Image (cartoon, grey):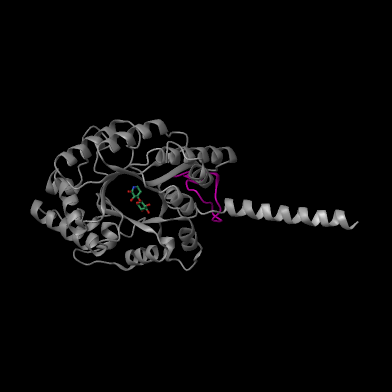
Amino acid sequence: MKTPSRGFSAACILLCVSALTVQTVTAQPLRELAAKRGVLYGAAVGAAFWKPDSSYRDLLARECNVIVAENEMKFDLIEPERGRFNWTRADDLVAFAERNGMKVRGHNLVWHAQSDWASKLNAGRDEMIAVMRAHILAVAGRYRGKILEWDVVNEAIDDGDDYLRDTFWRKAIGDDYIDLAFKFAHEADPHALLFYNDYGGEGMNTKSDKIYRLVKDMLARGVPLHGVGIQCHFVAGEIDTAGIDTNIKRLAALGLKVSVTELDIRLKLPADGAMLARQGEEYRALMNVFLKNPTCCTAFLTWGITDTYSWIPQFFKGYGAALPFDENNALKPAGKGLRDALSAAVPDGK
Ligand code: XIL
């Protein structure tokens, strides 16, 4: 009687130990897996960060080795009136990142949106340059040395037939507002990598051709530009990973870095298991493309981390479930896709 029972307990212990091992492997945070591959995984931090519930902060600290403010560093939020700055939340985020060994992306310095008072100034070229310069020197200057990558100019390319979007900055200053923004950012923080960031030009298409032209010309003019952010706000089932790979490679050939800056893959609600599984494949495929281009790709960020806090349901009615973690902060197939790509056998020599 004793032998089988001892055998039984030994088997139990073995089972428990292997269950624990599996547990540890599956629970390995994305930031650790990313670090092993020499890359950063992270997320945009939403206003929920300042709610009393600490589970959101805990999730970010556990999973991310880079963060970006979803809104708090944007023009209107950080300079709500001309010359009056509100640093509280941005400072808080940067301090949180420092405490948790995370890098910070800065988003963004010059954009046509969320810049209300500046857009209504109706000032001439010189005054608008002064407004822009003062803003950039104050914001990028305050976080000098603490920001890995700044999205200096956001979404400057036109979605229609025109080349540049006709923003209030362009109307007042002229086409060189983009070059000037980069020059001021470099002056404010010579350590930060300076990015042009946009959506819709992730793969090979008319918009990415325009982005390519923009950044190539900027480099030819000697503008301090170091990378292109591909936002990656995707609809499930419409992602051209091969085109994204080609586009990343042509940008890399210019000597530029490419970061995935705002990834989410939205699903039509209600999302069923098959949709979530396919979305997981898409997350995995995108991370694989990113990892296949190690010379230029280091930062991979989703626009939020849990479906509890995402801009999608508000901005795209009827859609949601776009992020790697679910409402209980558990890894969805999307997050597992990232994890599987990060922990897979090393492709292409990385
Ligand atoms: C979005 C935020 O997620 C929202 O909370 C805000 O109301 C509007 O802006 N491209 C960008 C981001 O560069 O700054 C946008 O963020 C999403 C699209």
> What is the magenta segment's predominant secondary structure?
loop
Horizontal side, residue 294 vs residue 251: left or right: right
Q: How many marks?
A: 0
Above or below, 123 against 287 in this view is below
Which residue of the protein is positioned furthest toward the front in this rendering? 3
- Residue 329 in magenta? yes
- Residue 228 in magenta? no
Residue 164 seen: no
Above or below, 228 against 53 in this view is above
Q: Where is residue 341 in the image (x, y as percent from the top left)?
A: 49, 42
Residue range corresponding to the magenta coloring? 317-334
Depth check, front residue: 112 or 65: 65
Split into 4 quadrants, where in the image is the C terminus?
A: top left
Residue 42 seen: yes
Split into 4 quadrants, where in the image is the N terminus?
A: bottom right
Horizontal side, residue 43 vs residue 129: left or right: right
Q: In which quarter of the image is residue 288?
A: top left
Q: Position of residue 325 (x, y in %)?
A: 52, 51
Q: Quadrant of residue 133?
A: bottom left
Which residue of the protein is positioned furthest toward the right in this rendering? 1
Depth check, front residue: 139 or 7: 7
Q: Position of residue 150 (x, y in %)?
A: 28, 53
Horizontal side, residue 6 vs residue 269: left or right: right
Q: Position of residue 260 (x, y in %)?
A: 37, 45
- Taking the spot 26% from the left edge, 34% from the top edge, the residue there is 160
Above or below, 162 against 5 in this view is above
